[in-house]
Image (cartoon, coloured by chain):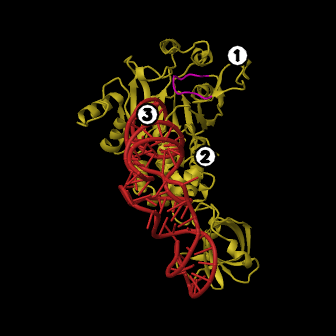
Chain colours: A yellow, B red
Amino acid sequence: MTIKEALASNNPIDDITISGWVRTRRDSKGFSFLSINDGSCLANIQAIVDDGIPGSESISMATTGSSIKLTGQLVESPGKGQSFEIKALEIEVTGTADDTYPLQKKGHSQEFLREIAHLRPRSNLFGCVFRTRSRLAYAIHQFFQEKGFVYVHTPIITASDCEGAGEMFRVTTLDGNQTDKKDDFFGKPTYLTVSGQLEVETFACALSNVYTFGPTFRAENSNTTRHASEFWMIEPEMAHCDLEGDMDLAEEMIQYLIKDTLQHCAEDLELFGKFVDKGLLERLHSVSDQAFQRISYTEAVKILKKSGMEFEYPIEWGINLQTEHERFLTEEYFKSPVTVHDYPKSIKPFYMRINDDGKTSAAMDLLVPGIGEIIGGSQREERLDVLMKNMEENNISKKDYSWYSDLRRYGTVPHSGFGLGFERMLMFVTGVANIRDVIPFPRTPGSADF
RNA sequence: UCCUGCGUAGCUCAGCGGUAGAGCGGGUGGCUGUUAACCACUAGGUCGUUGGUUCGAAUCCAACCGCAGGAGCCA
């Protein structure tokens, strides 16, 4: 039985077996108390082990970090702090942990725990983070599946080196002496994907509503709390959908995910609210209940200009919003998530649909307090002639991307989609400020341990 | 990649030119239905690395390495 199940019981249980890892042991003359955790939930279960029961001679080996198996009874606890506890009838120390075990009863810094990423899931904080991560992934599938979206697995190895964005990781079997790319495994240069969007568009133009959810790789040398070289991304793509519908879906999804987490990860969120981010629960409730703000890029620039704020980078129509601008909009001006739409076309990639004004693209970014951009999306250019012109202007090879323009050549439809950074969403939901602390084994420039 | 800060015991940190310290954790003993238990005793350190200044460097300077935060890029 898991500890979660045992603790959920309202009645004594005559015969119970639990297995887990010792968090603390408190010895008395004649008996010992153990706090045991198995990761099924945040809470530990307390066990009392009397001297003389089978296995009790090994109680001194049940140190912090060791693994044990207990058989006994679940009984009402005479002590304060827990309603039920286990009265052990038999104990077995499955695996010992000597005094080099790095986790202590006391709290550790997140920096230290990052260095022992193989043991940090045994800490309260990281147990909560990774249980929440699992539930959030499940909720994402549930959200799309309930709406009839089809889950598409786009390739991880790709020859599309474009989107204008991001440095890519080369995938190659060439050794140092071979230089001819024709000798490489795929006969041409290949990379790890930076986005499944272009490929998933082909499925949207067949199955209508689709989504991807998979790993994504960026070889950018970015060193921030919200960038990783390997992360997970969700990319829905909808046929017969314009930018308006795209923004509707993005906002509905964010609210759905927050509500789901509030409902199913209450115990974990309570810990985040207590130790990570005091305002977390209040913010999550307000975000899940209130309508999001929605403004055009042009309006955003006006607001920033009129704000009277001294920005390090003065805002001007035509340049991208800087982090400081985004933070001002979402954290100070609106104090809520903000969707900014219709950006200048010059700062957006070739596949985004050009608006009728000829100056802006049907693009949108969803900004949230504390993190900034959590979603980036657009309506795609569905007109063949306009797309070809965009490709020319952006120096995109028409030959390499003929399969992409074919979608406009054969039965083209208006379609839209966006990308949600999974870890950024998890950061928003948990209040954890560093992306390295919401990924089991984070990969960042200069660091790929474990 | 740029800017800033920080590397002292297993962990968190104090010391900031003159004999390396505390709390927690570990070990030993005691004690109690205990709750980050309590009490006593105890072990534990090339002060990130290399070089320089100085009679003398954990302390001042430089370079390098590592980590963190901010910026750019983005999700």
Side (left or right) of A322 relative to A275 = left
Q: Alpha-carbon distance for marks 3 and 1?
A: 41 Å
Name the element at disc 2.
loop
Query: Against A376, is B52 above or below?
Result: below
Q: Distance between the residues labelled 2 and 1?
A: 34 Å
Say if labels 3 and 1 share a chain.
Answer: yes
Residue A207 included in the magenta stretch of the image? no
The disc at residue A206 is none
Residue at the spot x=28%, y=34% of the render? Answer: A303
Quarter of image, res B2? top left
What's the residue type where badge 2 is placed? Answer: Phe
Q: How crowded is mark 1: few (under 14 residues within 10 Å), some or many (20 or more)?
A: few
Residue with the most extreme right position: A54
Residue numbers of the magenta segment: A160-169
Residue at image position (57%, 13%) is A397
Q: Is the magenta stretch mostly helix, strand or loop?
A: loop
Q: Is residue A256 visible to the viewer in this orientation of the structure?
A: no
Q: Do the residues labelled 3 and 1 touch (CB within 8 Å)?
A: no
